[in-house]
Amino acid sequence: MADISLNVLSAMITPAVLISGAGTLIMSTSTRVGRATDRVRHLTARFRLLVSAEGQQEPRAREEKRMIVRQLPRLARRTRLLVRAMTALYLAVALLVLTSILIGGSALLGEISGVLPVLLAVAGSASLAYAALLLSFETRLSARTTREEMDFLVGLGEHYSALYDDTYPEVAVEAGSAPPASEPRPQKSPEQT
C-alpha cells in the first residue's frame, strides 16, 4: 500500500513542477504587460507634447514623432502577444492542476484513471510551450523597438554634439548658435579681406 501511495504522490508532484514554472512565467509576463502599458502612456504623452507649439521647437521633433508613430502599432502587437501568453499560461496551470486532481482522485477511489490525466498533462505542457513561443516573439518586438529608439537617441546626441563641437564651428553657425562669448572670434588678417 505504501508503494502505491508513494507512486500516486510522485505522479501528482510531476505536474506541480510545471505549475511552478508556469507561475514564474505568469509573474514576469504580468510585469511585462505593465511595462508595455506604461510605455504606451509615455509615448502618447510625449507625442502630445511634440505636436504642441512648444514641442515643435525641439530638435528633431519631426523624426521623434515619426518614430513614435512607428512604435505604437508594435506596442499594440506586443500587448496582444503578452495577453495571449498570459491566457495560455493560465490555461496550462489549470490543466496541470486538473491532472494532479485526477491522479489523486483516481487513487483515492481505487479506480484506474486511464489516459485522461496524460492527455491533460500533454495539453498543459503544450499550452506552456505555446506561451513561451509567444513570449519569445514579444521579446524580439521589444528589442526592435529599443534598437530603433537607441538609433534615434544616437542621432540626437550627434545633433547636440555638433552644436557644441569646437572642431566644427560652421555646423554651429549653420544651426543658428553663435560661439560662446568667452571665446574670442578669430580675426581676419588684412590679406584675407
Image: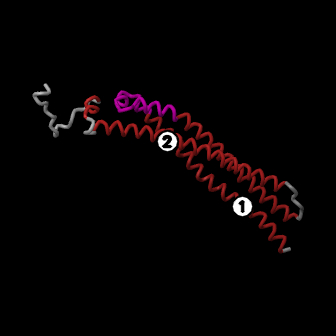
Q: Position of residue 127 (x, y in %)?
A: 72, 49
Front of the two marks 1 and 2: 2
Q: Which mark is residue 147?
A: 2
- Determine whether, in the image, residue 122 is placed left or right of residue 52: right
Q: Position of residue 131 (x, y in %)?
A: 67, 47
- Determine whether, in the image, residue 105 is placed left or right of residue 37: right
Q: Which mark is residue 16?
A: 1
Q: Are marks 1 and 2 in contact (CB under 8 Å)?
A: no
- Residue at 78 percent across and 53 percent down: it is 122
| Dot 1 or dot 2, earlier in sequence | 1
- Determine whether, in the image, residue 106 is placed left or right of residue 124: right
Magenta highlight range: 47-71
The outermost residue toward the left is 190
Main secondary structure along the magenta-highlighted residues: helix
Residue 132 or 6: which is nearer the viewer? 132
Q: Image quadrant for the N terminus?
A: bottom right
The outermost residue toward the bottom is 2
Res. 121 image quadrant: bottom right
In the structure shown, which secondary structural element does the residue marked by tag 2 occupy? helix
The outermost residue toward the top is 193
Q: Position of residue 89 (x, y in %)?
A: 68, 50
Q: Which mark is residue 133?
A: none
| Amino acid type, residue under disc 2 in the picture | Arg
- Residue at 39 percent across and 28 percent down: it is 52
